[in-house]
Structures are given as structure tokens and as C-alpha cells.
Amino acid sequence: MGINSESDIAANLQIGPTTEGMVRIYVEGEGFEIPMDFDPEEAEEIAEELRAAAARARKMASKKGAKGRS
């Protein structure tokens, strides 16, 4: 499965600080739990990657919408 593949798997996502000063991304679904801890600098890098991906996705969606209106 790649990043562009759809899935029927449902999961909950939680993000927050830990008592040890880390940032935890916690993914939980039916039969699995994935806690991922990052130092604050790594978490900021991930946030920047998320923002950049959101901007690219917006551009792709607007191009797709523009094609449909032609």
C-alpha cells in the first residue's frame, strides 16, 4: 500500500506533549496502537512537511476543479 492508495482502515489520531518533553503522535485503530515520540525540533519539521503537503494538495485540487469547469 502506498501513500496514494485508499484504505477501509479507520483510526484515531491524537497529538500532544508527553511528561518527558516529547511530542507524541498516537494512532489507534481496531487491533493496533502506534505511539510515536518526537523531540520538539522533529515535531516542528513534521508540522512543516504537513503544511507543505497541504499546500500541494490544495494546488492539485484546484487544478482538478479547473479542468472540470472547462
Image (tube, rainbow, N blue to C red):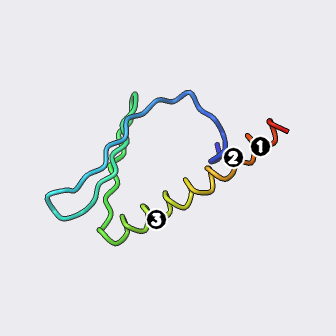
Q: Which residue is mark 3?
A: 48
Foreground: 57 or 30? 57
Quarter of the image where one finds residue 42: bottom left
Please state if 7 lies on the left or on the right of 19 as rendered. right
Q: Nearer the viewer, mark 1 or mark 3?
A: 1
Q: Determine the secondary structure under disc 1.
A: helix
- Density class for disc 3 (Cα within 10 Å; few <14, some 14-19, many ≥20) is few
Q: Label 1, label 2: how many angstroms apart (C-alpha)?
A: 6 Å
Q: Residue at x 46, y 29 (%)?
A: 10
> In the rendered view, does 12 fall on the left or right side of 9?
left
Which quadrant, please, contains the N terminus? Answer: top right
Pointer 1: residues within 10 angstroms few (<14), some, or many (20+)?
Answer: few
Q: Residue furthest bottom?
A: 41
- Residue 62's mark? 2
Q: Give, as a three-letter code, the residue at label 2.
A: Ser
Which amino acid is tagged 1? Ala
Answer whether labels 2 and 3 touch (C-beta < 8 Å).
no
Q: Quadrant of the C terminus?
A: top right
The mark that comes first in sequence, 2 or 3, is: 3
**Tag 2: Cα neighbours inside 10 Å, few (<14), some, or many (≥20)?**
few
48 or 23: nearer the viewer: 48
Residue indicated by mark 1: 66
x%, y% of residue 19?
A: 14, 58
